[in-house]
Amino acid sequence: MTDNNHMKETISDKDEQSDEKGGKAFLLKGGKVFVENEFVESDLLIKNGLIAAIGPDLEADGDARVIDCAGLMVCPGFIDIHCHGAMGRDIMDGLDSIEAIARFKATQGTTGFTPTILTNPLERMRWAAIQAKIAMNLPLTGARVLGVHIEGPFVNPNYKGALPEADILLPNIYEIQLFLTELGDAAKIVTIAPELPGAESTIRLLKKRNIVVSAGHTDCSYQKMVQAINWGVTNLSHTFNAMRPVHHREPGLIAAAIDDDRVYCDVICDLIHVHEWIIKFLAKAKGLDKCIIITDAISAAGMPEGEYTLGGQYVIVSGRAPRLIDGRLAGSVLTMIRGVRNIAEKAGLGMPAALKMAAENPARLLGIFENKGSLAPGKDADVCIIDGRRRVTHTFVEGALVYEMGVTEIVRPNLDSGKEQQNGDNGR
């Protein structure tokens, strides 16, 4: 167990900057705080947008609001590296839609995400990517936009999934340089099929620019994937979906990715795209340190079943599965908190593993773990609180309280009887 006395640390005075992030201080009192991959009975103090201290018997500063977290889990905020939409809004529709999606994602415990630009005509892709870049610097009302994920257009049409085939192209250094010139440091992830002509030079360029190169929508062989990893590929996009499958005589790129510790595997954890036992197998074979929960959510996330669009394509959602008219799966309606529950409960890996896959691992992939992805003094106060039914009750993004469940809705275990009870916080 972690020593609570060791945990009672504070950030130094030089780290306490003027409050450019969360303006109000919060003391999260008596919760089960997820620290160093285990839950510890502790308090957590948020101040100046940062985690100021973690430890027992912390005192509130001045007018800090105290939130009673008894029986609740205090967790690092989730990071979703693959998201196309929510609440009837599509990332490709621009700034207003991205802001609405960010607000919804915060209600589900997500504190940061990379809006994912779907393969479309190049001009539309560039416009949408620039909109996402602009959203990175807007005032916080929901999850923070951490950068841009460009999915395609340099993918294999044989594994197009729900990407429009007419817009798929061979890798082109000139086109990718245009994207990088316009996006600068906002470009975080590019999904590409490594077996295509011209892929090597594109992957090497992206690696040189410190952009995550993710293999996806691909017919890559085992041998070609081994090469691609050496060129700079460090992730698989929606592992098992829209890619060459594993075969006992031709293992393909999935086996190569599992075998190489430099590579992460992200997975759509809605249990529709991938069976829970396959996810459990992947976690055991690959190791929990390299598995990531993604949603690949489309505009239908958070909405009733019915008719929606994905990058201009008609989609029907039935039984929680979005499909194109021809029956192909077209993203998901998954939220990160449901993905965490699925991993913890249905795949049987437990909450510590699920939280690692939802927060720490994507932060490490993006190179932002120094500031995000776990709870520690001095890091950004990206925090979600989860109740006895594994629902998000509060979400803090960089110290700002951007979501709060109704006071009477919160369910926490009865510490005497082990049963759940409903009550609220004693915030002031």
Image (tube, rainbow, N blue to C red):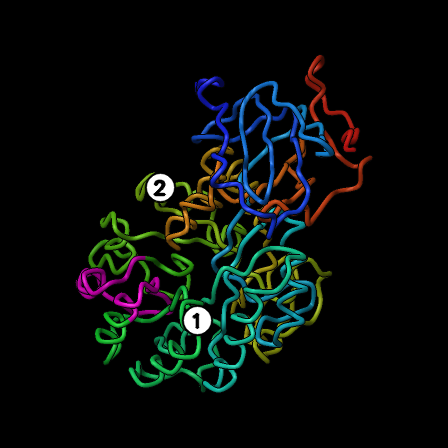
Q: Where 159 sits versus 380, above or below?
A: below
Q: Which residue is mark 1?
A: 150
The residue type indicated by label 2 comes to: Asp
Q: Quadrant of the C terminus?
A: top right
Q: Can residue 214 be spotted in the picture?
A: no
Tag 1 secondary structure: strand
Q: Residue at x 47, y 46 (%)?
A: 372
Image location of residue 195, percent across then percent down: 25, 72
Toward which corner of the image does residue 190 lie, by quadrant?
Answer: bottom left
Q: Quadrant of residue 409?
A: top right
Q: Residue furthest top?
A: 416
Amino acid type at image mark 1: Ile
Dots 2 and 1: beta carbons under 8 Å? Answer: no
**Depth check, front residue: 269 or 88:** 88
Q: Nearer the viewer, residue 5 or 192?
A: 5
Other-residue count near label 1 (Cα within 10 Å), few / some / many at <14 / 14–19 / ≥20: many
The x and y percentages for residue 262 are: 25, 51
Residue 212 x %, y %: 34, 62
Labelled disc at residue 289: 2
Tell me, yes or no, whether the highlighted magenta stretch contains residue 427.
Answer: no
Q: Which mark is residue 236?
A: none
